[in-house]
Amino acid sequence: MEKNFIEKRRFYRLPLNVSLLVTDNQGTVVGGALNISRGGVFLKTLKPLPLDSIGHVTFVLPGQEKSICFKAKVAHLVFDRQRAEVDCGMGLQFVEIEEKHQRILDQYIENEKVAYEALDKVLRARRPLVSDIEKHLQQLTHLRGLDLSELRYRVARICTIFETTSLGEVGTMR
């Protein structure tokens, strides 16, 4: 990581693979989510809204039947012409949210954390049982199809973000 990089994120991000609809007074952008936190979401797109634009983000979280909507601001843009492995898009910071939608989001994130930690425990076994792995992949469907080595890496990598920080906090970055 670059020496002068300053981390501004307050909350950890979890992978998310759902469609998002973002509208502002200029138009609509539809794309796939890359990750989500309690404070925002990253939308993969080659046609982002301008920086600092304010709009509404609408999507359905996995396991939910109804959509949730947040007022959000375009907090940062990513467009890297040099590296194909970098997803282009825009980071949307939630600026206004109904309390019931915040509760739904918080519960989703907590459930994902618990699911990752449970799967990580299974994967730490020298020879984990396929049936145990499959049971956990029912919730973490985006991890299906990975070989054991890649699955162990991805799950362990996500679980590192839940570890206690130097300030004694879990799941937040300062």
Image (tube, rainbow, N blue to C red):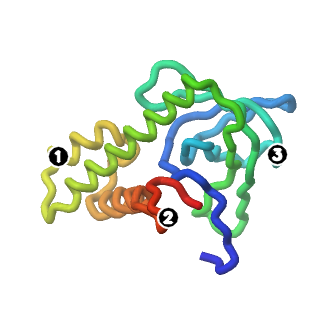
- Where does the image place residue 144, in percent across and percent down from the top left? 33, 46
Amino acid beneath label 3: Asp
Q: Nearer the viewer, residue 32 or 110?
A: 110
What is the count of numbered marks?
Answer: 3
Amino acid beneath label 2: Leu
The dot on residue 132 is: 1
In terms of sequence position, does the residue under pointer 3 or pointer 2 come before the other?
3
For marks 2 and 1, give the CA distance. Answer: 35 Å
In terms of sequence position, does the residue under pointer 2 or pointer 1 come before the other?
1
The dot on residue 52 is: 3
For marks 3 and 2, give the CA distance. Answer: 31 Å
User: Which residue is rendered at x = 59% and y = 76% of the image?
Assistant: 1
Q: Which residue is mark 2?
A: 167
In terms of sequence position, does the residue under pointer 1 or pointer 3 come before the other?
3
Residue 77 appears in which quarter of the rendering?
bottom right
Residue 97 appears in which quarter of the rendering?
top right
Badge 2: residue crowd in 10 Å (few <14, some 14–19, many ≥20): few
Measured along the vertical axis of the image, is residue 7 above or below residue 40?
below
- Where does the image place residue 157, in percent across and percent down from the top left? 40, 62
Task: Say which element carries label 1.
Answer: helix
User: Which residue is rendered at x = 48% and y = 48% of the image?
Assistant: 15
Q: Quadrant of the C terminus?
A: bottom right
